[in-house]
């Protein structure tokens, strides 16, 4: 089983997720999206798995800067936007065995375990 967690190191939500994973004895690989932004193909796979709506970081400045036009965007337009600015991606984003399974860190521990298969 391979779990990757995409995010940025100074994100408070990511830090909470890292602590939970470590406290749960789960090994994971952290991928810093600022230093290693995901490719368009990877993002397309994530959108196919999760949909673009839960992947949007709606509290970030990058999202606000898009303006109201973003409200009518298609999957393709969101994929392009995520690929051009990784700060638009909600954090953390969990990938298990190559498939995006969860984004954010608001689920109960039981749901987290189920989605991550732990």
Image: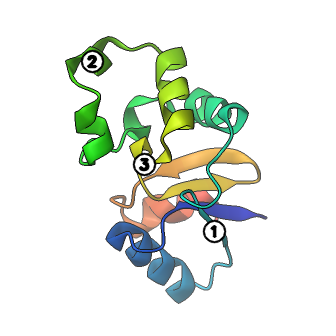
Label ID, residue 8: none
Classed neighbour count for the residue bearing mark 2: other residues with Cα under 10 Å, few (<14), some (14–19), many (≥20) = few
> Callout 1: 10 Å neighbours few (<14), some, many (20+)?
few
Residue at the spot of label 2: 71
Q: Quadrant of residue 14?
A: bottom left
Label 3 belongs to which residue? 87
Q: What's the residue at 48%, 18% (across, down)? A: 77
Is residue 15 toward the left or the right of residue 6 in the image?
left
- Residue toward you, 36 or 93: 36
- In the visual, does 9 lie left or right of 73? right
Residue holding disc 1: 118
Q: Is residue 20 above or below residue 5?
A: below
Q: Are marks 3 and 2 in contact (CB under 8 Å)?
A: no
Q: Nearer the viewer, mark 3 or mark 1?
A: 3
- What's the distance in space between the residues labelled 3 and 1, CA to CA? 28 Å
From mark 3 to mark 2, how far is it between C-alphas? 18 Å
Q: Residues within 10 Å of mark 3 (few under 14, many from 20)?
A: many
């Amino acid at each position: 089983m391979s779990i990757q967690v995409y995010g940025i190191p100074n994100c408070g939500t990511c830090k909470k997720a890292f602590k939970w994973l470590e406290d749960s004895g789960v090994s994971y690989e952290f991928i810093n999206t600022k230093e290693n932004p995901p490719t368009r193909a990877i993002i397309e796979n994530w959108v196919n798995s999760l949909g673009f709506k839960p992947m949007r970081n709606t509290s970030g400045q990058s999202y606000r800067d898009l303006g109201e036009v973003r409200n009518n965007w298609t999957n393709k337009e969101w994929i392009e936007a995520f690929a051009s600015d990784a700060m638009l991606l909600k954090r953390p984003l969990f990938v298990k065995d190559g498939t995006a399974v969860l984004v954010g860190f608001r689920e109960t521990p039981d749901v987290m375990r189920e989605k991550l298969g732990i």
